[in-house]
Structures are given as C-alpha cells and as structure tokens.
Amino acid sequence: MNNKIKISPSILASDFSQLGNEVIAIAEAGADYIHVDVMDGHFVPNLTIGPGIVKSIRDKTDIPFDVHLMIDPIEPYIDEFAKAGADIISIHPEANDNTDKCIDRIKSHNVKAGLAINPDTDWKVVLPYLNKIDLIIVMSVHPGFGGQKFIPSALEKLKQLRAEIDNSNLDIELEIDGGINFENIQSVIDAGANVIVAGTTTFAGGKSEYANNITRLRGQ
C-alpha cells in the first residue's frame, strides 16, 4: 500500500460560477486528484456535470480527474467522459449495465477503472472484479447530494476491503466518499482509505484556506 494519503476534492462543493479558477486553486493548494461527481437524476436524485464541463476544465490542471459516474445506463457515456479527459472512471455495480463490459470499455481508453459501492451494498460485490480495477470507492453517504452526514458502518467496509486488497497484493486504491471532515478523517485513514474525497471540508473558508484544509485532511 502506498502510504501517501491522497486528497480528491469534489468540485460539487466549489463555486460553479468560477469553476475553472476553482480547479486551478485547488490544484495549486496541493490536491492529488479532482473528483468529478456525475449524477443523472435517475440513478441518484440529482443532476450535475456532463462531459462538456469536464472537457472545459481539463486544461486548467495536469492532475488526474477522478470521475465518479452515478448514472444508469453507464456504457453509452464512457467514451465521452474518457475523451473529455477523465483519468479514472468509477462506476456502480448497482446500476443495471453489465459491470464487466463497462470496465473493459473504460480500460479500452487507457483510463483507470473503479467500482463505487453504496452504503447498503455488501463490499464483497467487488471481489469478481479485483484483477481488473484500479480503485474502489466506499460511499459513506447515500449518493445524490453533498454535505450529508458520514455513515459509520463505512469504516468496517474499509477495513474488510483493505485486508482483501493487501492480502491479494493488488495495486488498488481505496477511496472514501461522503461526509468526510476534520473530526472523522483519522478514523477513515486508520480503517485503510488512502484516497479521501472531500467537498464541503476542502472548499470551506475560501481559496486562502484550501491548502490548510488539504494538509489537515492528510492527517498532517
């Protein structure tokens, strides 16, 4: 396991009227990834970002775009997000599309593939795909809206997945997404997460605080 804790700020919590500048600022503040929440108003109860927005901000930074597709169907949109500049595309096995086929399509673009699992989903759903994926996202809120309260049962799921990844000796990043703040950050790191998605906490206080927020989220 890479001991470096990576921070992936969710731009869902940024000032959308200044999105390009927000991406630049958060990258300069030390973010490792840019987390892009894609919601379709069908699989989850919200509408957010399409591939056109991803493409419009791709030239603002060189750091990887961590694109989380909370959509169903998935497959018709993979090509567009890959071409728009996604470096990692994570999908939900709870969607109705063929998960294997979608992972293969993501990988065909030389893009990393991830699986995201909802709070009510057993962590073992990822086991058949471990040899094909690069990232697992444990959702610690019910997807759809930012600013929700952290669901503590995610910690046990992280521990189980961390043990499985380490025992398999696979190079898979373990990401936590939802309700992360300065009070619970250490518990998710201790449970095995090495990529932290944080929206509200990262963007709190405006641009002058971004670097400090990121440092604190790393547990430093």
Image (cartoon, helix red, strand yellow):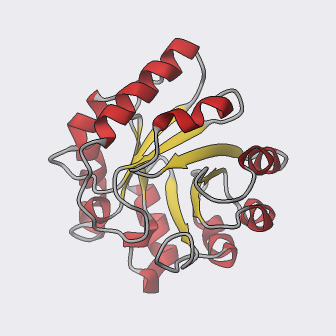
Nearer to me, 11 or 178 = 178
- Residue 147 appears anywhere in the view: yes
Instruction: Tell me which residue sits at (81%, 44%) in the image.
Output: 104
Q: Position of residue 36 (x, y in %)?
A: 53, 63
Vertical placement of residue 19 versus 154, above or below: below
Does residue 79 appear to the left or right of 207 in the view shown?
A: right
Report which quarter residue 169 is drawn in: top right
Q: Position of residue 124 (x, y in %)?
A: 52, 32
Instruction: Tell me which residue sits at (18%, 49%) in the image.
Output: 182
Q: Position of residue 50 (x, y in %)?
A: 64, 76
Instruction: Tell me which residue sits at (62%, 59%) in the image.
Output: 95
Does residue 183 appear to the left or right of 144 in the view shown?
A: left
Does residue 58 appear to the left or right of 41 in the view shown?
A: right
Pick the quarter of the image with the C terminus: top left
Q: Residue furthest bottom?
A: 17
Vertical placement of residue 59 versus 151, above or below: below
Does residue 169 appear to the left or right of 146 in the view shown?
A: right
- Residue 219 appears anywhere in the view: no
Q: Residue furthest right?
A: 108
Nearer to me, 207 or 166 = 166
Vertical placement of residue 77 versus 117, above or below: below
Picture mark count: 0
Vertical placement of residue 35 versus 189, above or below: below
Q: Position of residue 167 (x, y in %)?
A: 51, 13
Q: Residue furthest left?
A: 183
Nearer to me, 95 or 60 = 95
